[in-house]
Each structure stands twice: as structure tokens, then as C-alpha cells.
């Protein structure tokens, strides 16, 4: 899967298996600072934190204030809300909220660098069954973040009901009626995995980690990441044509993967 424009830069990316071998050893935010002529790109690889006391948050803020980008590209969708304080921004939307708060103060744009979910689903459904995709996406986007404390004290059942409607059905993903509640999802999990679902950090989690080489759902995860990377690279290339200073903040796995592609991109400017 490659970029449709910009010289197909995604083909220069690191494999996600290689990324998995190095991602736990890098300092976060992982900052790539590249200049070519009058163009300057800073790409920050982050772990998504909603703790405004996390040292990573202060480093992201310092980098933004020192760089003063013309435009910033974020992960996870377009943010339109205006925040009253930095603390509120981080607690509600993590580093994306922080960048929205700083961008608003600076009167500079913050844009979504991600593929629209509806398009990702459409493309991924051409390769995988809706059951396998739903099983993967719920683990990757809901269950594992929930186990890591990303969604507060809400129950997994409550989170699932809202997520199915907002993240999937409203985005055009075909969800069978029996899978619109968490009990249905647990039945799907057991049928696919061969044993009951457990809401805990257990060995099954590794079977959904895109950095692991030989598992079905890891492969789905890698293909999802590569698709998103191709869109991100297109957007970075496009913004560099019209702006001198571009900043990007994405999960550090993504940034580690596309680092060689970014260096190639800048050399071709």
C-alpha cells in the first residue's frame, strides 16, 4: 500500500516489526528535525498521555513554542473545540488538545493527519472480514487503551456501546445487531480466539500487537498502520509545498516507521 502522490514515499519506511524492536528504547517525544532550503520539518513521536504533569507534555510545549510552526498536523481526527486552559486541553484530548490550545493562541492551523475512519474501513474491508476487523479494532482502540487507563472509570460495557455507534456505525462500518453490545463482542472473541475474553493484561494482548511478526491480528494492525502512514506522508508533503515550517505529532510507532521516508521526502524538495 503506497502513497498515490509524492513519489510513493511510504516505500522507504521502516517495517513495523523493526519499529517494535526499537520503540521502547527511544526518549519520548522522539523528535526528528529536518531542514532543506527554506523548508523546516519537525516530527514528534509521542505516547498518548492525558496527564498534564507528564514531562513529555512540557517538552512538546517547549518544542512548539521554540519552533513556532506555520501549521501543525495531529493524529486522531480534526479538533474544533477551543479550550480555556492548557490543563483542560491535555486532560480532555492529550497532546492533541495541547497543540490545539497552543495553535489557537498562536492563530495557526492544526489539521488532522489521519485517514478518515470511513475510508480506512472501506479499504480494509476489501482485504479482511468485518468480524476480524471489528475484533482487532475494538482490542486496539478500546480494550487495550481502557486497560491502560485512557478512558477513566467508565465500564467497558458503557464504553463499547458508545464506541460501536460513534466510531463504527456512524462511520459506515457494518456491525451486525448481535455485536452492538459487549456480550456479543465477547462471543465473537471466543469464537475467533478459542477461549473466553478476559478484561486484563494477559498473553492474548500480544496477539493484537502490530509489532509481532507471526499472528493474524498483528498483520491486520500493520496494514492499518501502513495505510494511515501513507495518508500522513501525503499530507506532510502537501503542507510543505505551501508552508515553510511544518510540525507533526503522532504516536511514536508511526514516526519511527516513517522516519526514513521523511528524510527522503525532504531531500527531494
Image (spheres, rainbow, N blue to C red):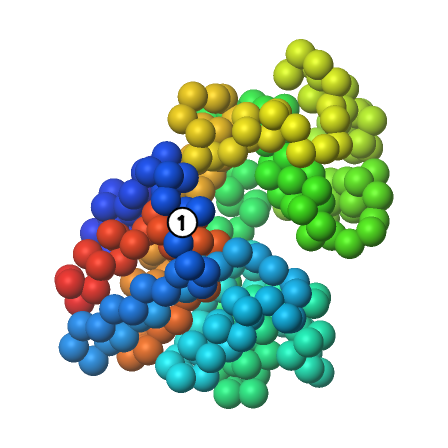
Regarding residue 241, the answer to whether it shows in the image is no
Q: Nearer the viewer, residue 79 or 29?
A: 29
Relative image position of residue 152 (x, y in whole percent): 78, 54
- Please say whether residue 115 is visible from this viewpoint: yes
In which quadrant of the rendered image does the C terminus lie?
bottom left
Residue annotated with mark 1: 25
Q: Is residue 196 left or right of residue 89?
A: right
SS state under label 1: helix
Q: Residue at x 16, y 77 (%)?
A: 37
Q: Quadrant of the N terminus?
A: top left
Q: Is residue 68 left or right of residue 111?
A: left
Residue at 35% x, 47% y: name it: 257
Residue 40 position within the rendered picture, expressed as x and y whole percent measured from the top left: 27, 75
**Residue in the foreground of this view, choosing between 2 and 102:** 102
Quarter occupied by residue 39: bottom left
Task: Please name the residue shown 58% across and 73% down the image.
Answer: 98
- Rendered location of residue 235, percent (x, y): 37, 61
Question: In the rendered image of this protein, does residue 9 appear above or below residue 88?
Answer: above
Q: Nearer the viewer, residue 228 or 258?
A: 258
> How far across and down, in percent of the image, does residue 252 sit?
44, 54
Rendered position, 199 above or below 197:
below
Question: What residue is rendered at 40% in x and 49% in y?
Answer: 25
- Residue 27: quadrant of the picture: bottom left
Amino acid at each position: 500500500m503506497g502513497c498515490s502522490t509524492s513519489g510513493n514515499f511510504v516505500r522507504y519506511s521502516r517495517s513495523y516489526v523493526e519499529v517494535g524492536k526499537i520503540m521502547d528504547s527511544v526518549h519520548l517525544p522522539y523528535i526528528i528535525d529536518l531542514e532543506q532550503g527554506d523548508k523546516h520539518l519537525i516530527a514528534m513521536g509521542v505516547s498518548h498521555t492525558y496527564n498534564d504533569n507528564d514531562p513529555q507534555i512540557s517538552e512538546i510545549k517547549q518544542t512548539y513554542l521554540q519552533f513556532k510552526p506555520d501549521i501543525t498536523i495531529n493524529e486522531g481526527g480534526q479538533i474544533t473545540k477551543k479550550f480555556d486552559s492548557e490543563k483542560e486541553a491535555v486532560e480532555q484530548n492529550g497532546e492533541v488538545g495541547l497543540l490545539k490550545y497552543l495553535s489557537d493562541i498562536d492563530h495557526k492551523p492544526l489539521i488532522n493527519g489521519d485517514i478518515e475512519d470511513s475510508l480506512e474501513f472501506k479499504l480494509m474491508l476489501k482485504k479482511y472480514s468485518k468480524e476480524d476487523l471489528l475484533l482487532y479494532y475494538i482490542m486496539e482502540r478500546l480494550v487495550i487503551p481502557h486497560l491502560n487507563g485512557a478512558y477513566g472509570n467508565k465500564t467497558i460495557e458503557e464504553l463499547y456501546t458508545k464506541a460501536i455507534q460513534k466510531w463504527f456505525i456512524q462511520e459506515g462500518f457494518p456491525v451486525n445487531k448481535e455485536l452492538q453490545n459487549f456480550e456479543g463482542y465477547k462471543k465473537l472473541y471466543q469464537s475467533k480466539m478459542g477461549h473466553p475474553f478476559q478484561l486484563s493484561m494477559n498473553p492474548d494482548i500480544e496477539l493484537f500487537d502490530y509489532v509481532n511478526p507471526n499472528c493474524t491480528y498483528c498483520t491486520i494492525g500493520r496494514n492499518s498502520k501502513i495505510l494511515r502512514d501513507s495518508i500522513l506522508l501525503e499530507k506532510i508533503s502537501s503542507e510543505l509545498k505551501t508552508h515553510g515550517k511544518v510540525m507533526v505529532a503522532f504516536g511514536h510507532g508511526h514516526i519511527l516507521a516513517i522516519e526514513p521516508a521523511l528524510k527522503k521526502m525532504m531531500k527531494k524538495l
